Image (spheres, rainbow, N blue to C red):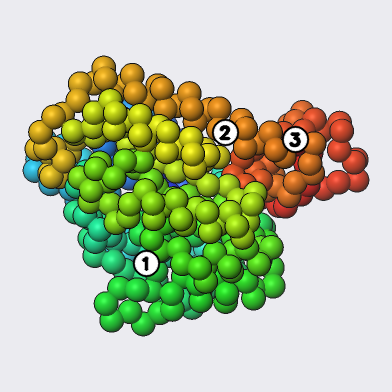
Amino acid sequence: MKKFVIRTLGCKVNQYDSLNLKKKLIETGFEYSRDSGEDVEFAIVNSCAVTKTSIRKGRRTLSLIRRDNPNAKIVLFGCWVKTYPEEMENIIADIIWPVGKLDELVQEIKKCFGNISGFKKELVKINPPGEGEKSRYFIKIQDGCEQFCSYCIIPYSRGKLFSRPQEEVLKEIESASIAGYDEIVLCGIHLGLYGKEKNSRTCNLNQLLQNALKIKKLGRIRLSSIEVVDVDDDLLNLIAKKKKLCKHLHFSLQAGNDKILKAMNRPYTTQYFRDRVEKARQLMPDIALTTDVIVGFPGETKEDFMTTLNFCKEIAFSRMHVFPFSAHEKTPAASMFCQLSREEKQKRSKMLRKVSDLMKKTYEDRFKGQCLDVVIEKVQKEVWGKTEFYFDIKQKKTLLEKSETLEIGKLNRLRN
């Protein structure tokens, strides 16, 4: 059978798209290889375009995959292709493909090789954790975004809102649970708008979660990044009441200053954000709240930055991802006045990351000495696991009961 490799850049949605493409190719008769080499006959790069840095990484990955697989045909697809089609004229690849329509992409790949032997009529089952897969199962339930934040390229690369049918999502959750994944991560480009696009024929996120909780083999469910404006009281109450829903929410703040939020075209104010956080903590005092913050947005003064820094301290996030602003020429933010220097953005990023490190330690220290449910991620001399609160803990294997079964992807208890 023809061997192929896939290299993926970017978000959890991209990771899921690559996994989905891999399954479709295997079903068609191709053989997946984790390793590059001379026997690989085609190599795939799933690209990202969320920042200019992501595009540079895409170029480098394309060069490396061509070098490491000298006899392979090259397939480039994803957000970089969709967002910057004019750049594709100078890209050397056998197939250049935008986002989506993976079944059609498979057919294009097949055309490169003629008849493929070993065609499999049966569907490929989900591989158990540890067999070249992650310890947690990521499932894309929604795609597209229509928010059009002034700095963001995603609405241009991912297009309009689209939700997968509830029945299809529930079936995949059940299959992943049966395969041995005790944590299912629901992800999407605009996750909170699942089922809310015009003429949608499926349910909303709240109803989907309620139905997913009925699956017998289900371990637990985690929500990926979600907009704070999409988390209503009903959803907070559901997360608070149901043990199988992780007490973790990732609200992308982006800025803790109302002037900058308005310039970003974000759909909330700092007061709205504060109120939703307070409501979440009333219901779940230990909830993990993680976030993203963009530093050095055009027009951000030192005073504006300090407002953001102090707001982050006030909210006391359990973890922050800090990004220096990176301009896309195809977004409104790229042409805004008062662009900051690279040095100033790096300086401010460093300051905010120090605050993030301190908040992370403070949050995790509150669980010191506690035994927590974790999904096992690695078993060596030490056992590593991810808590529902989205931080990792490790424990020496010798300190665990010898009778304990330690399987990648399964829930167990470790002492923090």
Q: Pointers 3 and 1 in contact (CB under 8 A)?
A: no
Q: CA distance from mark 1 to mark 2?
A: 29 Å
Residue 387: % across, % down:
66, 46
Question: What count of labels does the image hold?
Answer: 3
Residue 368 - label: 3
Residue named by callout 2? 360
Q: Amino acid at mark 2?
A: Lys
Q: Is residue 203 visible?
A: yes
Which comes before the other along the chain, label 2 or label 3?
Answer: 2
Task: Say what amino acid the circle numbered 1 marks.
Answer: Leu
Circle 1 is placed at which residue position?
A: 193
- In this image, 392 relative to 15: left or right? right
Task: Name the element at disc 2.
Answer: helix
Counting from the top left corner in percent of width and height, residue 406 is at: 78, 45
The quadrant the C terminus occupies is: top right
Residue at x 32%, y 21% (from the top left corner): 346
| For residue 359, side relative to residue 14 (left or right) | right
Q: Which residue is at a point 40% across and 32% down the rendered structure image?
A: 309
The mark nearer the N terminus, 3 or 1, is: 1
Relative to 2, residue 102 above or below: below
Distance between the alpha carbons at the discs numbered 3 and 1:
36 Å
Between the C-alphas of marks 2 and 3, the distance is: 13 Å
Secondary structure beneath dot 1 equals helix
Dot 1 alpha-carbon crowd within 10 angstroms: few under 14, some 14 to 19, many 20 or more: many
Q: Nearer the viewer, residue 239 or 171?
A: 239
Residue 409 as seen in the image, left or right of residue 368: left
Quadrant of the rendered structure where residue 114 is?
bottom left
> Do we see residue 377 in this rendering?
no
Residue shown at the point (91%, 45%) measured from the top left: 403
